[in-house]
Amino acid sequence: MSDALLAGYDAVLFDLDGTVYHGAQVIHGAPETVTAVRNQGTAVRFVTNNASKAPEDVVAHLRDLGLSAESAEVHTSAQAGVAVLGERLSKGAEVLVVGTESLADEVAAAGLAPVRKAGDGVAAVVQGHSPDNAWADLAEACLAIRAGALWVACNVDATLPSERGLLPGNGSMVAALRTATEAEPVVAGKPQPLLFETAARSAGANRPLVVGDRLDTDIAGAVAAGLDVLCVLTGVATPATLLRAVPAERPTHLGSDLTALTRPAEELRVGSRPGWEVGEGDVLTARGDGDPLDLLRTLCAAAWRTGVSTVRAEGDAAGAALTRLGLA
């Protein structure tokens, strides 16, 4: 496995939702691939924008799905959000929590005072995903933010991948408060680089690889941190969104799922691939035959170079590949 993608890095920083699992359903190949990374002697870290669970709960979930994990390997946006609060507030300051009890516990562990109601003493609002967040929670936060409280959002993911499909994420609830307050939060999680930088330091890594499924968080956060990134197509990113990706959201490598980590790095890099040619102009013209994902890697290179994301096929094989990719 010396030519495998993972062999070129001293740590792999895995996103979770949409990359390792969809809710209670593990994604194909995830347990075997994480084991392969560990067997290579490469450090593993799990870096999630989901602020609803404490690290030990994330570990329990991973173990239930057949993956080995330790609490020290988990880095959440709740931890990042509380780190921001700790930098800006005095010990004992009141923080209105919009989120789970585990987020409130993180606030308390940092020497701050979690509360659930707005009042004169509230210095900040911290907002993380919880399936129980309701209008009443947003109303309390609205009052505190309008009164001048610091507003920290653990993440702004608009959607959350689940076994049933995409569901509203913390970013959708943040959008509601933006509308109600006309304020902007400090965003602690991805795409800010803090989570990746913290995870890499904890692993003692000099050359970590990020693996994720969202262009606007996982890939953008890795780019902001100056790290290589493998984008997998098991979550939010699609071939169409990849073609339209702005420079700050463009992955280094592209794979169908986590098993790509055990494939040769050169096969996964975005760029021209054997069997395919792309004509450039007002429309990208795909011609040739081969692996549809190789066509996508070739198309991405052309689209990013030219700014053209409209594609047409020349020949039956190219047409079938574009159909497989959802680009026909």
Image (cartoon, rainbow, N blue to C red):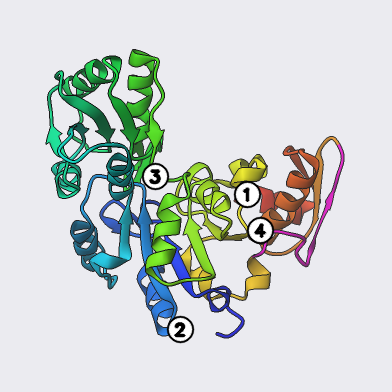
Whichever of labels 1 and 4 marks the residue nearer the N terminus, that label is: 1
* Secondary element type, mark 2: loop
Q: Is residue 183 one of those drawn in magenta? A: no
How far across and how far down the image is residue 267, in percent?
Answer: 66, 70
* Circle 4 Cα neighbour tier, 10 Å, few/some/many (<14 / 14–19 / ≥20): some
| Residue occupying image coordinates x 86% and y 44% | 280
Q: Are marks 1 and 3 in contact (CB under 8 Å)?
A: no
The quarter of the picture where the N terminus appears is bottom right
**Residue 35's quadrant in the figure?**
bottom left
- Which mark lies nearer to you, 1 or 3? 3
How far across and how far down the image is residue 275, in percent?
Answer: 78, 65
Residue 182 falls left or right of residue 109: right
- Which mark lies nearer to you, 4 or 3? 3
* Residue identifier under label 3: 189
Whichever of labels 1 and 2 marks the residue nearer the N terminus, that label is: 2
Real-space Cα separation, disc 1 to disc 2, in angstroms? 27 Å
* Circle 2 Cα neighbour tier, 10 Å, few/some/many (<14 / 14–19 / ≥20): some
Tell me the magenta residue range.
269-281
* Residue identifier under label 1: 250
Real-space Cα separation, disc 4 to disc 3, in angstroms? 33 Å
* Residue identifier under label 4: 292
Whichever of labels 1 and 3 marks the residue nearer the N terminus, that label is: 3
* Secondary element type, mark 4: helix
Residue 191 falls left or right of residue 97: right
* Circle 3 Cα neighbour tier, 10 Å, few/some/many (<14 / 14–19 / ≥20): many
* Residue identifier under label 2: 40
